[in-house]
Image (cartoon, grey):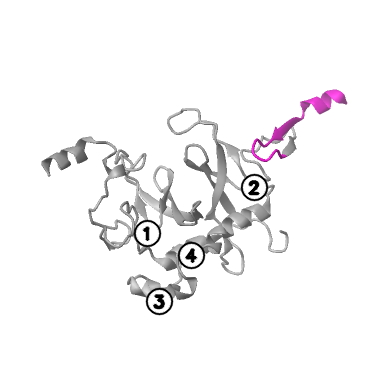
């Protein structure tokens, strides 16, 4: 086990190839997050509010000194048809994407995907062209 | 007359071949108005990449401000570029509606699923 701890400390790409099983408390909404039930070994965002923390420069290296909150700004579809959440760091503006986990809040996910079509006070927010002018 | 014509620059998209004339007062667009692709000049460390940045998503930044999220086909880095009014609107809306066409969970059971995970079921702001 000591050898494993040493590896974790000095191998920069340790978390790229090894699962991270630490549990954490979401810094944004306070949700207690455990690693089980995600359907993935690399959970990086809170399943309730979908926020993440900017820890990595490249996947798994834990080298970033920013540690800002990463806001979910959208979803996109990967080649295999699975969804991935696009995160943007509130502090430095870095954009990254991560696969959705099995236990992510489906209501929040759908709200993210439907954002460009949302209506607020009878207007389409963000839509710079009128409805009939497509 | 010919001299005036020579001053016009032509923007050509390297992905779809769309050409448009850039007038003197305009700056060249940073993405193609037809296919919304652009060229990835260099990555974060300053290395040259040269891959094609494909549009993968729409980010609603604020009211009346949309940004196109692009991903490099070659190195996988992501970046954003502001959408302009010259952009292909059908392409914009098709990118925005792509996730909805392939939901990862049954949409009709969404409320039940949210309650099962103990999450917030109100449909308020995120």
Which residue carries the number 4 mark?
Answer: A111
Residue on which disc 1 sits: A101
> Can residue B8 be seen?
yes
Residue extending farthest to the top is B3
The residue at which mark 3 appears reads as: B112
Q: Are marks 3 and 1 in contact (CB under 8 Å)?
A: no
The residues bearing labels 4 and 1 have C-alpha atoms spaced at a distance of: 16 Å
Q: Residue at x 69, y 47 (%)?
A: B86
B78 or B29, nearer to the observer = B78
Is A1 situated above or below A108? above
Residue placed at 25% from the left, 60% from the top?
A34
Q: Residue at x 70, y 38 (%)?
A: B17
Alpha carbons under labels 3 and 1: distance apart: 17 Å
Single out the mark in the foreground, 4 or 3.
3
Res B4 → quadrant: top right
Residue B84's disc is 2
């Amino acid at each position: 086990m000591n050898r494993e701890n040493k590896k974790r400390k000095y191998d920069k790409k340790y978390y790229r190839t090894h699962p991270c099983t630490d549990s954490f408390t979401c810094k944004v909404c306070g949700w207690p997050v455990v690693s089980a039930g995600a359907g993935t070994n690399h959970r990086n965002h809170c399943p309730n509010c979908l926020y993440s923390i900017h820890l990595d420069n490249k996947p798994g290296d834990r080298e970033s000194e920013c540690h800002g909150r990463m806001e979910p700004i959208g979803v996109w579809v990967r080649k295999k048809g699975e969804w991935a959440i696009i995160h943007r760091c509130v502090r430095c503006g870095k954009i990254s994407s991560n696969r959705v986990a099995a236990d992510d809040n489906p209501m929040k996910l759908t709200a993210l995907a439907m954002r460009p079509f949302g209506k607020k006070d009878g207007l389409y927010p963000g839509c710079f062209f009128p409805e009939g002018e497509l | 007359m010919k001299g005036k014509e020579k001053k016009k620059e032509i923007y050509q998209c390297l992905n779809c071949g769309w050409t448009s004339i850039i007038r003197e007062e305009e700056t060249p667009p940073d993405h193609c108005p037809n296919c919304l692709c652009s060229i990835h000049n260099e990555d974060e460390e300053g290395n040259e990449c040269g891959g094609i940045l494909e549009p993968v998503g729409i980010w609603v930044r604020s009211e009346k401000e949309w940004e196109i999220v692009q991903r490099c086909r070659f190195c996988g880095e992501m970046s954003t570029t502001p959408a302009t009014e010259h952009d292909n609107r059908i392409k914009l809306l098709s990118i925005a509606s792509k996730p909805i066409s392939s939901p990862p969970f049954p949409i009709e059971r969404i409320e039940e699923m949210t309650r099962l995970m103990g999450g917030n079921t109100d449909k308020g702001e995120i």
